[in-house]
Image (spheres, helix red, strand yellow):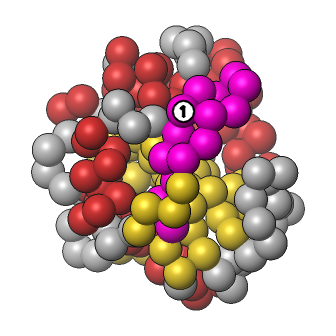
Amino acid sequence: MQLSDGVITLRPIAVSDAEAHLAGEDRELVRWLNGGRGSLESVTAYFEECAANWAAQGPQRTFAITRNDTLVGTLDIQIGRPFLAAGQADLTYGIYPMWRGHGFATKAVVLGCRYLARTGLAEEVVLRIDPVNADAVGVARRARFHYLRSSDEPGEGPLDWYIQAL
């Protein structure tokens, strides 16, 4: 299963991507996504869970974002999360530092939405973004998401919710 726009490709993440992911992880990814620096063991275990979710058609789909077969980031789609309404999917992504500024995040979000529309897994996509993360807000706007609301949940902090119907 692959999706491409001719510039980037989304494919299911593989355990073999763990080392490349760690090499690309930086302070920004840790700050906005990971919550802590990964180790080869923790990333490998996580990617094994991701592969199992794909095999079981589970509630999480983790994609490798690639450019010419080089891992440039990841994209996660999750359905059935307690904070989501029925028919919604939560989408998160991270682009590695050397690949930022080329529009790959926006392209990945658009491809993730196309995946959800084709599979029927969701009717709406939600991006929950820390309002301080101006780059992510820009991605939401370029991908034509609309501001829905703000939240400030314990353990998550302030988040602005952007939504797009599929």
Is residue 162 visible in this depiction of the protein? yes
Q: Nearer the viewer, residue 141 or 80?
A: 141
Is residue 16 visible in this depiction of the protein? no
Q: Nearer the viewer, residue 97 or 137?
A: 137
Q: Please, is residue 142 above or below residue 37 in the view? A: below
Q: Is 15 a magenta residue?
A: no
Report crowding for label 1: few under 14, some 14 to 19, many 20 or more residues within 10 A (C-alpha). Answer: some
Q: Quadrant of the N terminus?
A: bottom right
- How many marks on residues? 1
Identify which residue is drawn at 23% across, 74% down. Answer: 6
In percent of width and height, residue 83 lies at 76, 51
In percent of width and height, residue 76 lies at 57, 51
Q: Please, is residue 140 above or below residue 13 in the view? A: below
Q: Nearer the viewer, residue 166 or 29?
A: 166
Write down the region rendered in magenta.
150-163
Q: Please, is residue 6 above or below residue 85 in the view? A: below
Residue type, mark 1 in image = Pro
Q: Is 156 a magenta residue?
A: yes
In percent of width and height, residue 114 lies at 47, 79
Identify which residue is drawn at 71% across, 49% down. Answer: 51
In percent of width and height, residue 111 lies at 41, 71
Identify which residue is drawn at 72% across, 25% down. Answer: 154
**Label 1 sits on residue:** 158
